[in-house]
Structure formats: C-alpha cells, structure tokens
Amino acid sequence: MSTTGSPVRGPAAPFGGLSVLGVVAGLVALTTLVPLVVIGISALGAGWPELSRLVFRPRTVELLANTGRLVVGSVALCVVLGTGAAWLVSRTDLPLRRLWHVVMVAPLAVPAFVNAYAWSSLLPAADGFGGALIVVTLSYFPLVYLPVAATLRGLDPALAESAAALGLSPGAVFLRATLPQLRPAVLGGSLLVALHLVAEFGALSLVRFPTLSTAVYDQFRSSFNGPAANALASVLVIVCLVLLTAELVLRGRTAYARVGAGAARTPRPTSLGWWTGPASLAMLVVGVVAILVPLGSVGYWWVQGGSTTLDAGALASTTAATLGLGLLTAAAVTVAAFPVAWLAVRRPGFWAMSIERLTYVGTGLPGIVVALALVTVALRLVPPLYQTSTMLVAAYAILFLPRAVVSLRAGLMQLPTALEDAAASLGLGPLAVVRRVVVPIIAPALGAGAALAFLGASTELTATLLLSPLGTQTLATQFWSYSSSIDYGAAAPYAALLILISAPATFLLTRHPEDPPTA
C-alpha cells in the first residue's frame, strides 16, 4: 500500500554516482538560468539607488497586489475545481465518466487569450479582477485536474478501504486518507497554475487587468525602458522564488510509491447517491463556461464579424509554422525534462532539489523577458542564432519545461525502484533499463508532458513576437494582431485554428481515464 512515512531512497537504480543524467540535468538547469542572469546583470548595472526608486514606488506595490490576489484566488479555485472533478471522474460512480474526463481536459485546447477574447467580446463588462479571475481559472484548472486524476487512478485503494472500515464517512475518508496522498499532484499543479499566472500577458491585457507581467511588456513596448522593465522583472523573479519555496516546503519529503507485497487493485467506485444529479450539473456548468462559451464566441464573430476576406494562404502558412514549432518544442522539452525529473525522484537531496527548482524560474517570467535575455546573449556570443527557429524553440523550452517536469516527476514517483534494480541485476545497462523498463511504464507521463509543452508553444505570444524568424507568423501572433485592434471578425479564424490544432494534443491527455495502473 502507499506509504506516508520517511522517504524510501534505496538504490538509485539504474545509475550510480554522479550519473550522466545528473550532469545533463545540471546543464538543463543552467540553460534555464540565462534570463535570470541577464536580469541580474541589468539590475546591478542600474545601481541600487535607481533600482530602489523603480521598485519601491506605489505603482509597483499596486501591481504586486494585483498579481498576488489573482494568484491566490485563481489557484484556490483551480484546486477546488481540479481536485473535485478528478475525484468525481476517477473514484465515484458518476455517469458518463469518460465523457466528463474529456470535458475537464478540453479547456487546455482553448488558449487563455482566446478565452479572454471570447468573454470580453461578448460581455464587455467582463473585465478587471472579476473577469481576469474567471478567464484564468477556466483556462488553467486542468493543470490541477490532470495530475490529480492520474494520481487517483494509480493509488492503491487499500488505505481508503481501511479508513472506511474504521467507520469514517466517505468525506472523512477522502480528507484523511486520500487527500494526503494527492499532495504532490495538487501542489505540482498549483505551482504550474501560479507560475503561469505570474507570467500571463495576453489574457490579462484583453480583460484590462494590470499585473507585473503586463507592466513589463508595456515598459518594453511603449518606451523601451530597459531598467524599469528589468526592475519589475526582478520583482517577478522574487515572486517565483517565493512560490517555489512554498511548494517545496508544503510538499515535504514523503515517499508515495507503493511498496510491499501484493498488487494494486482497481478501486471500487464510491456511490454518490442523491448527489449524482448535482454533481453532473456542476460538471455540465464547468464544461459550458469553459468550452462552449469560447467556441460560441469564435463562431459568432467568424460569421457575423467578417470584416476582411479570408486569406487561405495566410491561414495555411501560419498553421504550418505553429505546428512545426510546437512539435519541435514538445520533443526538446520532453528530452530535457527526463533527467531533471529522474534526478529529483531517484536522487533526492540538495543537488537534485536545486536543479529542479531552477528549471521553474523561467516559466514565471513573461515571455518577452526570456526573449530579450536570449537576444542579448545571442547577439554577444552567437550572432548567427538571432531570429532563428533554434532560438525560438530554446525560449519555448525555458518557458514550458516545468510542464513536462511535473508530469514526469509524478510518473516516476509511482514507479518503484525495485523494478529498475531487478532489470539491472539481470545484466541490463543503464540506458537499456531506461529504454526497456522506465520509459514503457511512464509512457503516459511522457505523452502528457509532451502534449502540455506542445500546447504551450503553439499558443505562446510575446516571445514569438520578438524571436520569430523574419517572415514567420504563427496563429497566435496573427490572432493578436487582429484582436488587439478590435477586429474580432478577422481574428476569429485564427482563434478557431488555434483550438483545432490544440485538440489532438489535448486528446492525448484524455486517453484511458479509467484504466488501472500498469505497473
């Protein structure tokens, strides 16, 4: 059964010592530090008097407060929605569970700025904090739902059944037996939501809610004021470090892999009784507001607001560019995330923890900050890389690496080291153990990480605007060009295609929602 005691390290099979994967993980972490180093150098160059003047002013405090309340409010709502929906789909007798699983994951196919476009164009009053809270919650709650649902499917029901046998009610069983085992998944998903909110720009601009991230973009765009923008970016870095530390402290060092004899069983669904109707209605409401509203808005503006002639050639070229960049990013991020996740799970300690934490910093920075940092480095060290697809994919990797790390870490945490040790004892080398034992078992986690990276890259906006090669436009940049000028009809086809190409990656995240674990 699942353990809740001290961490079980055991042999770090299949690698020993400072492994090749450990060195690669260190190099990955160093790469993600590039934006942080550039910000630090810029801040030091401005001097403390100028930096303190830019940071300690009323406007910065206001922006920090806006960012903070949006993060707290949205993370809380995402945890409630994501965890509640995951429990209903994975552990109850709710009718149409497979359908509801797809509905809960489907919002990932709708980019946050498309969601904001939908709500703000149909309901102009949906702006400010209230509109921002609704839009980002509906866009990001699947980041909590997915890891929690995956963990629930992999949990041995013996602990919950023992708690029920002691007379605890279903609610008490969930709170006291099941929820503690969900802590890594809930915290990992919450961290991703928080970091995305800290860096969110497009959606918050469309609903006119100023945060630190939108202010950084405005500083660079309006006045090219590098010191002011970097001062605000330094505040964002501090916010990211606070979030990372909080998640680390709350997660603790408890091990969650199943140990001991016997095989895990498929859990018996909890009967909802008369709560079946309200639960189904709640799932339906979430699906309507998170999926049907943006789809309906896009369709409405495509039909009613067509102020320009549809350019099939432009749609085809932007779609091809978006798909190519997204697939490259998915492959690169998945490969880079594996050594980081493996080190964090199989070699817990200060070195592994530091590497994993460092990879999260980039995703909490606005895309424009990451892009400008890479431009600075490229122009000074490797000029041929400037405005190439390689540099753009590198920016995407820095921004979306944590999506894959969280997914792979969750998969590796439920993979007992005994399987790797057994394979190694049979004479398999380290790479053979990874290829023949580890990868097949954590394949769903690998697929989920790749899909999340693809979704992020295909919908990224600010870094793409700055780093895309000359003549290259993506669906996101074309959509932004039209929507920012309030040409909703011209923007609608690009929004529709963004949703369409995101659908296959989202489908990968919905596979086999009720299957028992294979390991």
Image (spheres, grey):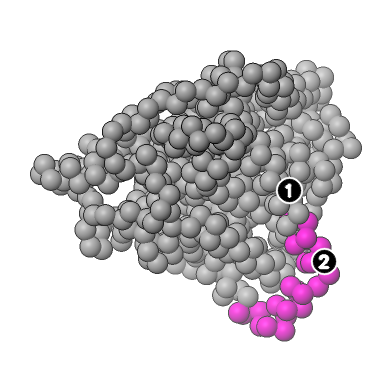
**Which mark, residue 73?**
1
Q: Is residue 240 above or below residue 231?
A: above
For marks 1 and 2, give the CA distance: 21 Å
Q: Quadrant of the N terminus?
A: top left
Residue 353 vertical placement versus 334 (above, below): below
Q: Is residue 473 left or right of residue 160?
A: right
Q: Residue at x 48, y 58 (%)?
A: 252
Residue 46 in magenta stretch: yes
Estimate how packed mark 2 is, as few (under 14), some (14 to 19) or many (20 or more) residues with alpha carbons within 10 Å: few
Q: Residue at x 77, y 44 (%)?
A: 132
Where the C terminus falls, by quadrant? top left
In the image, residue 82 above or below residue 349? above
Q: Secondary structure at mark 2?
A: helix
| Quadrant in the picture for residue 144 | top right
Query: Does the image show residue 314?
Result: no
Number of numbered markers: 2
Please indicate, yes or no, whether residue 51 appears anywhere in the rendered image: yes
In the rendered image, residue 15, in percent from the top left (x then y), is placed at 22, 54
- The circle drawn on residue 59 is 2
The residue sitting at 82% across, 35% down in the picture is: 120
Any magenta on residue 65? yes
Q: Residue furthest left?
A: 427
Name the side, left or right, on which 71 lies relative to 404.
right
Q: Is residue 152 left or right of residue 118?
A: left
- Specify the amino acid type for callout 1: Gly
Residue 127 location (% of width, % of height): 84, 42
Q: Which residues are magenta?
A: 44-67
Rendering coords of residue 374 (x, y %): 52, 60
Count neighbours of disc 1 (C-alpha within 10 A) and say few if under 14, some if 14 to 19, many if 20 or more: few
What is the three-letter code of the residue carrying label 2? Answer: Arg
Instruction: Give the mark toward the camera: 1 or 2.
Output: 1
